[in-house]
Image: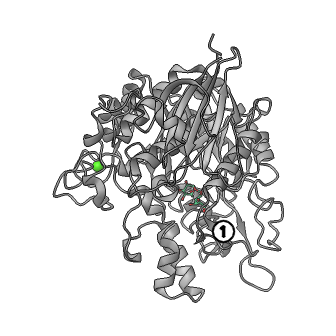
């Protein structure tokens, strides 16, 4: 008996970074027709919804997260008719479309901001956060942006400072203004009327700033502009204004969020968000100085954080599960082994994460083991956040070489290289002879869709669906298993044998209606692990290593070995 739950709890979401997915008009830039062209590939992965990064009109200062018109498609990606065709073609394949709404800030080229600068007393004068200089002159407070620059910029024309928690070209919208809130809800309805099934909402937990905008005393941001006082009421009002609000999904991106705040924003009784994108597992390799002061990552820490959050978002909450995205390094480079054990580590991490309780969000390219780009110098970096961090580190006194070393591992460019469709010159992302907006990773000759597409089971394994070296085949088998096994979609999550320090991550998924239990086990290290001395008897449903007979199960787990067992009753 399968539990009926909303479509977005059953879903597997595929996160597309449109500018790097597929170019079809030879400009070296991904476009909507490129996504349409690849919908069969997306469907065959076992995906039932796509989340696309922003494709609205934008000067592209922050790769589209600086929007100058929320109702227009940026000509680089196509037009409104291409978006309507994409929604239709996706729907024909049982795939829903989620758009990325960037509502904390607009572009400084948006007509609202242009009017706000020119006519402080006009209808848009209060659409942004303007303040006079502090009494002694200078910015109104000491806030710093997420992009390593002060959070205030001076407008000579208006004679005031305006707030931007990101780049100066991304002025924060003033959510205190009821007309701003009405306009934003209307934009969402414009897209809902065109058939989208929901939204990923960019940095939605920074839309409420503490009254009076007081300076930060000890560098804290929480309460000042992270999870400020009116985020929840603003979200409740926003959702109450949405058409089709019962059938859509709202996924909030919430940097720095705490478990209790995540529960509050997603509690079904609060009618605000349905899921949040958390950050504690993607900050584990941040040293004392944060993202640009990296430190090694411990698998046991990864297990602990993930287990804590599964507990924090136990029913009635519902987790989202992601391993990387366009802001993060590639998962196989960051948590796995992009060298010797690329197949094993990419598939072990996918097993250990995407079979947890929650909705899996797969970032484009992770399904074929795409890895970090071999950056050698800062001139290769395109990303504004990474470039600003480099310049700030040099201003702080680091040598250019030291500053580059600090930003190279965490550069956001790693997750933005073009999708690797084939071994051809530009990886099949764009035609040979065309210069893509960012170079294709040279490893595309070995790691691409084309050489992973054949999925006959490997002769030497009795394991279903595993064709060695094809991460793509394994992902397909993994999501097919999730679709087949009700416990993986709606069952409980219980950690199994979480010895501190062990690199083995194991958990049960138990049906809430029958007594059936699945056991998921993954060795998140490159050394053999014994856990436990012998695995319990059960039916092997999936494994990323050839299993001949039961031998391997008695000697423990090979490096990066992952498997799923249906336990005997
Ligand atoms: O991860 C981060 C915190 O260090 C940042 O890379 C990122 O800016 C933050 O997660 C918020 O990300 C979102 O908003 C930004 C945009 O640059 C990111 O691409 C987007 O995902 C501003 O719109
Ligand atoms: Ca193009």
Q: Position of residue 481 (x, y in %)?
A: 49, 25
Q: Is residue 59 visible?
A: no
Residue at the extreme top = 1
Q: Judge left or right: residue 480 versus residue 497.
A: left
Q: Is residue 95 above or below residue 421?
A: above
Q: Is residue 295 left or right of residue 413?
A: right
Q: In the rendered image, which quarter is residue 169 located in?
A: bottom right
Q: Secondary structure at mark 1?
A: strand
Residue pictured at 42% horizontal, 33% vertical: 547
Residue 172 spot, x, y in % from top left: 64, 59
Instruction: Answer above or below: position of 515 versus 30.
Output: above
Residue ranking furthest to the left: 433
At a point 54% along the width and 28% down the height, the residue shown is 11
Q: Quarter of the image containing the N terminus?
A: top right
- At 65% from the left edge and 51% from the top edge, which residue is drawn? 502
Viewer-side residue, 294 vs 539: 539
Q: How many marks?
A: 1
Tell me where residue 91 sits by quadrant: top left
In this figure, which residue is indicated by the disc labeled 1? 162
Q: Quadrant for the C terminus, please.
A: top right
Mark 1: few/some/many CA within 10 Å (<14, 14-19, 20+): many
Q: Position of residue 171 (x, y in %)?
A: 60, 62
In the picture provided, is 424 more to the left or to the right than 569?
Answer: left
């Amino acid at each position: 008996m399968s539990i009926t739950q909303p479509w977005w709890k059953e879903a597997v979401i595929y996160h597309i970074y449109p500018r790097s997915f597929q170019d079809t008009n030879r400009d070296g830039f991904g476009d909507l027709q490129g996504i349409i062209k690849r919908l069969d590939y997306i469907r065959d992965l076992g995906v039932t919804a796509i989340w696309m990064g922003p494709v609205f009109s934008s000067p592209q200062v922050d790769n589209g997260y600086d929007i100058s018109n929320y109702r227009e498609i940026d000509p680089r990606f196509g037009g409104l008719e291409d978006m309507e065709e994409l929604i239709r073609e996706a729907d024909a394949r049982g795939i829903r479309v989620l758009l990325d709404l960037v509502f904390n800030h607009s572009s400084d080229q948006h007509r609202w901001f242009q009017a706000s600068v020119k006519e402080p007393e006009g209808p848009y004068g209060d659409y942004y956060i303007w303040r006079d200089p502090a009494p002694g002159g200078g910015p109104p407070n000491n806030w710093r942006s997420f992009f390593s620059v002060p959070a205030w910029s001076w407008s000579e024309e208006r004679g005031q400072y305006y707030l931007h928690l990101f780049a100066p070209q991304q002025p924060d919208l003033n959510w205190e203004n009821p007309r701003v809130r009405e306009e934003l809800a209307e934009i969402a309805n414009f897209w809902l009327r065109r058939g989208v099934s929901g939204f990923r909402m960019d940095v939605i937990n920074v839309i409420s700033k503490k009254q009076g905008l007081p300076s930060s005393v000890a560098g804290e941001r929480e309460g000042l502009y992270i999870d400020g006082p009116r985020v929840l009421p603003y979200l409740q009002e926003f959702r109450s204004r949405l058409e089709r609000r019962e059938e859509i999904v709202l996924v909030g991106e919430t940097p720095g969020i705490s478990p209790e705040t995540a529960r509050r924003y997603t509690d079904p009784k609060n009618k605000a968000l349905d899921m949040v994108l958390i950050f504690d597992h993607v900050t584990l390799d941040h040293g004392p100085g944060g993202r640009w002061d990296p430190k090694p990552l411990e698998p046991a820490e990864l297990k602990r954080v993930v287990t804590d959050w599964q507990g924090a978002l136990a029913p009635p909450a519902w987790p989202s599960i992601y391993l990387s995205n366009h802001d993060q390094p590639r998962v196989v480079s960051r948590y796995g082994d992009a060298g010797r054990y690329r197949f094993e580590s990419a598939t072990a991490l996918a097993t250990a994460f995407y079979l947890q309780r929650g909705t899996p969000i797969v970032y484009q390219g992770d399904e074929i083991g795409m890895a970090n780009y071999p950056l050698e110098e800062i001139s290769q970096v395109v990303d504004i956040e990474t470039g600003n961090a480099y310049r700030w580190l040099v201003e702080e006194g680091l040598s250019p070489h030291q500053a580059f070393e600090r930003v190279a591992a965490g550069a956001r460019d790693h997750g933005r290289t073009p999708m690797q469709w084939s071994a051809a010159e530009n990886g099949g992302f764009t035609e040979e002879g065309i210069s893509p907006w960012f170079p294709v990773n040279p490893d595309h000759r070995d790691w691409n869709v084309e050489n992973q597409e054949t999925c006959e089971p490997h002769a030497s394994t009795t394991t279903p669906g595993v064709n060695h070296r094809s991460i793509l085949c394994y992902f397909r088998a993994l999501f097919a298993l999730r679709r087949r096994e009700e416990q993986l979609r709606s069952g409980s999550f219980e950690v199994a044998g979480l010895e501190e320090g062990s690199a083995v991550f194991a958990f049960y998924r138990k049906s809430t209606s029958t007594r059936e239990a699945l056991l998921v086990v993954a060795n998140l290290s490159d050394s053999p692990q014994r856990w436990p001395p012998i695995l319990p008897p059960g039916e092997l449903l999936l494994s990323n290593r050839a299993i001949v007979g039961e031998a391997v199960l008695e000697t423990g787990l090979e490096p990066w070995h992952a498997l799923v067992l249906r336990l005997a009753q």
